[in-house]
Each structure stands twice: as C-alpha cells, then as structure tokens.
Amino acid sequence: MFQCDKCGECCRHLNLSSLYHFLDRGDGVCRYLSGNLCTVYEKRPLLCRVDESYEAYFRESMTKNDYYELNYKACDKIKTKNK
C-alpha cells in the first residue's frame, strides 16, 4: 500500500498536471482540501487513489514497486520545490 504522509502538497499543486483540472478551485489547490486533509477522502476520484489507479491504469505496463517509486519521486519533488 502506498504510504502517504498526508502533507497535502499534491493537493495544493494540481496545476502541475492537467489531469486534475476538474478538482482545481482556480488557484491550483483542490477544492476538497481542508488543512492537509481531503474532505471527500472516502469518495475521492480514482486519480487520487494511488493503489487503485495502479490497478486500473498501470498494472499492465509496470510493476507496482516501479509505480510506487515514481509516485514517491513526484511527491519528493513537489515537497522540495515548495520549501
């Protein structure tokens, strides 16, 4: 299972990917973010569910470990860029 530290940085920078435009409240921040947490967590979109997105879109093209590594690298990049 993907280990998220719940920092909220990915939800504060939706403008980095056009895939999330429908969640952007207009300033790059997810309209469902409150503090660092998602207010619709149990019903969040599939693209926001790392493990389920892997199964739906990526399991035929890469291993789960490779997929996690890509997600962790993206997460670290967002955190580092915004310090």
Image (cartoon, rainbow, N blue to C red):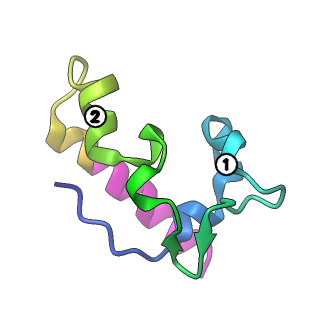
At 44% from the left and 50% from the top, the residue drawn is: 43
26 over 8 or under it: above or below: above
Please rate how many residues cluster around mark 1, counting C-alpha atoms within 10 Å: few if below 14, some from 14 to 19, many from 20: some
> Disc 1 to disc 2, how far (Cα)?
20 Å
Relative image position of residue 15 (x, y in whole percent): 71, 50
Q: Nearer the viewer, residue 57 or 33?
A: 33
Is residue 3 shown left or right of residue 79? left
Please rate how many residues cluster around mark 2, counting C-alpha atoms within 10 Å: few if below 14, some from 14 to 19, many from 20: some
Residue at the limit of the structure toward the right, as seen here:
26
Relative image position of residue 29 (x, y in whole percent): 70, 63
**What residue span does the magenta drawing correspond to?**
69-83
Q: Which residue is mark 2?
A: 54
In the image, is residue 53 part of the stretch drawn in magenta? no
Q: Which residue is mark 1?
A: 23
Relative image position of residue 35 (x, y in whole percent): 58, 82
Q: Amino acid at mark 1?
A: Leu
Image disc number at residue 43: none
Magenta region, mostly helix, strand or loop? helix
In the image, is residue 74 part of the stretch drawn in magenta? yes
The reply to whether dot 1 and dot 2 touch (C-beta < 8 Å) is no
Q: Which is nearer the N-term, disc 1 or disc 2?
A: 1
At 16% from the left and 54% from the top, the residue drawn is: 1
At 17% from the left and 38% from the top, the residue drawn is: 64
Quarter of the view holding residue 76 = bottom left
At 21% from the left and 25% from the top, the residue drawn is: 59
Is residue 26 shown left or right of residue 21? right
Residue at the limit of the structure toward the top, as seen here:
60
Relative image position of residue 38 (x, y in whole percent): 50, 67
